Image (cartoon, rainbow, N blue to C red):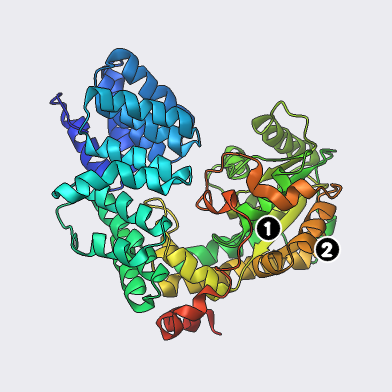
């Protein structure tokens, strides 16, 4: 996004966005808007930062305000389209891209965005047709090369996809986030072409650019604090809210373990609704305790205070709906299973699991949002974090017994109907054949698995780790298996 203003904060915000530092960009833009409330560039840049950090509603409002102030900028309409694509409004996005291209027909970022939207609509030929002339002409933006490679992969040509990207390496003059995308897409192409060593090396390079310093000791201390707040031997007798709320389902677990698939199955039921990855439980805890630790504060809570926390959660997640079963799929709530059961005694907890080696390579090969999941950019860290998460879940299993249901990704794929029936029964729902065709709901999914749940169940990701062999030794060593 080119700047016409000289406000140094906005110039710095652009650099922060290119480097994947959306939080820093957001702070800079808000400061600029505090002084110039109608600055359309500040609004557009803040929209971009909010979109990158998952604040989609605010991002949409901001970019529409920027366009209302200045509707002649192609990049604004392109950003509106990007945000609409993220939200799953693909047809609206295509319309916004077309407006952008009327203003600037050769805007390669907009062309790449529109092609990506066609890919999301499972139309690789339309995506390829859009970018191929630029590729043949040469000198195309890296974003064009990347979406062209994606289209080639979807069209069954992974070797050609890899070739389209290899000559762009190492792309050191490109923005950090574009380089990250380059390596992860190249890795996927190599993996589809059965070039597993090369795929792993590409994923490794992408993760080096993502590298966050994972603090295992801090993670252990955090889990110890929660376990100490909810001792197994006294858990059942601890104060509980009087909330009679039923039909609340909480799905927890690791990334890439079938949680979105499980949520989509429930959402496909006429009486089930997935609410996505809500931040409400941690926000309620923050509002209640501030920075105090649970081990110091939880034991002193009264039933009245627990009721207040439960009401805050219900108010924050209320929606006008006829469905009786509502699903909160915030995986990080694995830490707060005890909190959830004390706030909502009738809540159901579903724990999604997967072979840790397959889960590990799936996390390692995924371009995760910048500055998130610090443990995921290193195989050793993935293994150590997994062990900590399992320690936490074993504690909750000891506390809850059969009140917690485990759904194995491998079991779900191998025995779809049987496992689906078990999930629905646990949720108190009658079996419905719609749940076996979960991909037909047309529901917008905003997680990493958004494309996978638009397709029928497939088994190609089961035992994925076996293709990488000894390359996963560091993960295996950290897991201790």
Rendering coords of residue 176 (x, y %): 25, 52
Secondary structure, mark 2, is helix
Dot 1 alpha-carbon crowd within 10 angstroms: few under 14, some 14 to 19, many 20 or more: some
Badge 2: residue crowd in 10 Å (few <14, some 14–19, many ≥20): few
Would you name the residue on which mark 2 appears? Answer: 402
Taking the image as drawn, is residue 427 in sight?
Answer: yes
Q: State left or right for residue 335 relative to residue 103.
A: right
Looking at the rendering, which quadrant does residue 47 occupy? top left
| In the image, residue 361 above or below residue 425 | below
**Left or right side of 285 for 71:** left
- C-alpha distance separating marks 1 and 2: 21 Å
Q: Nearer the viewer, residue 199 or 49?
A: 199
Location of residue 209 in the rendering, given as x and y in whole percent from the top left corner: 28, 60
| Whether residue 343 can be seen here | no
The reply to whether the C-beta atoms of the residues labelled 1 and 2 are less than 8 Å apart is no
Along the horizontal axis of the image, is 189 left or right of 361? left
Quadrant for the N terminus, please: top left
Rendered position, 21 above or below 60: below
Work out whether mark 1 precedes mark 2 in sequence or the reverse, and give the earlier one.
1
Q: Depth check: give the residue in front, 186 or 255.
A: 186
**Mark 1 or mark 2, which is nearer to you?**
2
Note whether 283 is above or below 368 in the view shown.
above
Residue for badge 1:
229
Q: Is residue 288 left or right of residue 310?
A: left
Residue appearing at x 27%, y 16% in the figure: 70
């Amino acid at each position: 996004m080119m700047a016409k203003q000289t406000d140094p904060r906005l110039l710095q915000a652009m650099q922060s966005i290119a480097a994947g530092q959306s939080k820093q960009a957001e702070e800079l833009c808000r400061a600029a808007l505090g002084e110039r409330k109608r600055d359309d560039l500040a609004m557009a840049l803040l929209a971009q930062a909010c979109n990158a950090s998952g604040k989609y509603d605010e991002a949409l409002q901001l970019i529409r305000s920027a366009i209302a102030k200045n509707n002649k900028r192609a990049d604004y309409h392109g950003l509106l389209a990007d945000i609409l694509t993220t939200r799953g409004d693909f047809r609206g996005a295509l319309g916004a891209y077309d407006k952008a291209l009327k203003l600037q027909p050769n805007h390669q970022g907009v062309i790449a965005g529109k092609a990506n939207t066609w890919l999301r609509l499972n139309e690789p030929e339309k995506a390829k047709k859009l970018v191929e002339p630029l590729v043949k002409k040469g000198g195309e933006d890296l974003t064009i090369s990347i979406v062209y490679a994606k289209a080639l992969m979807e069209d069954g040509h992974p070797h050609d996809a890899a070739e389209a990207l290899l000559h762009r390496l190492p792309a050191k003059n490109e923005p950090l986030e574009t380089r990250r995308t380059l390596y992860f897409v190249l890795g996927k192409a190599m993996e589809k072409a059965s070039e597993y060593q090369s795929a792993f090396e590409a994923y490794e390079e992408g993760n080096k650019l993502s590298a966050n310093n994972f603090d295992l000791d801090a993670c252990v201390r955090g889990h110890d604090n929660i376990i100490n707040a909810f001792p197994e031997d006294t858990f059942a007798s601890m104060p509980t809210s009087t909330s009679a709320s039923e039909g609340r389902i909480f799905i927890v677990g690791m990334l890439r373990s079938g949680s979105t698939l499980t949520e989509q199955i429930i959402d496909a039921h006429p009486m089930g609704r997935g609410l996505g990855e809500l931040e409400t439980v941690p926000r309620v805890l923050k509002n209640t305790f501030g920075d105090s630790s649970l081990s110091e504060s939880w034991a002193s809570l009264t039933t009245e205070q627990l009721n207040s926390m439960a009401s805050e959660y219900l108010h924050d997640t209320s929606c006008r709906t006829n469905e009786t079963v509502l699903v909160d799929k915030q995986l990080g709530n694995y830490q707060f299973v005890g909190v959830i059961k004390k706030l909502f005694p009738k809540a159901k907890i579903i724990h999604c699991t997967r072979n840790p080696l397959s889960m590990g390579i799936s996390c390692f090969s995924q371009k995760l949002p910048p500055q998130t999941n610090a443990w995921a950019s290193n195989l050793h860290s993935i293994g150590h974090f997994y062990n900590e998460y399992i320690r936490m879940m074993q504690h909750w299993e000891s506390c809850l017994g059969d009140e917690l249901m485990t759904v194995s990704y491998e079991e779900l794929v191998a025995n779809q109907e049987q496992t689906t029936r078990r999930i629905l029964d646990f949720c108190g729902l009658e079996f419905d054949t719609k749940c076996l065709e979960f991909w037909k709901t047309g529901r917008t999914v905003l997680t990493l698995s958004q494309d996978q749940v638009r397709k029928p169940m497939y088994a190609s990701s089961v035992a994925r780790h076996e293709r990488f062999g000894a390359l996963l030794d560091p993960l295996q060593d950290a897991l201790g298996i």
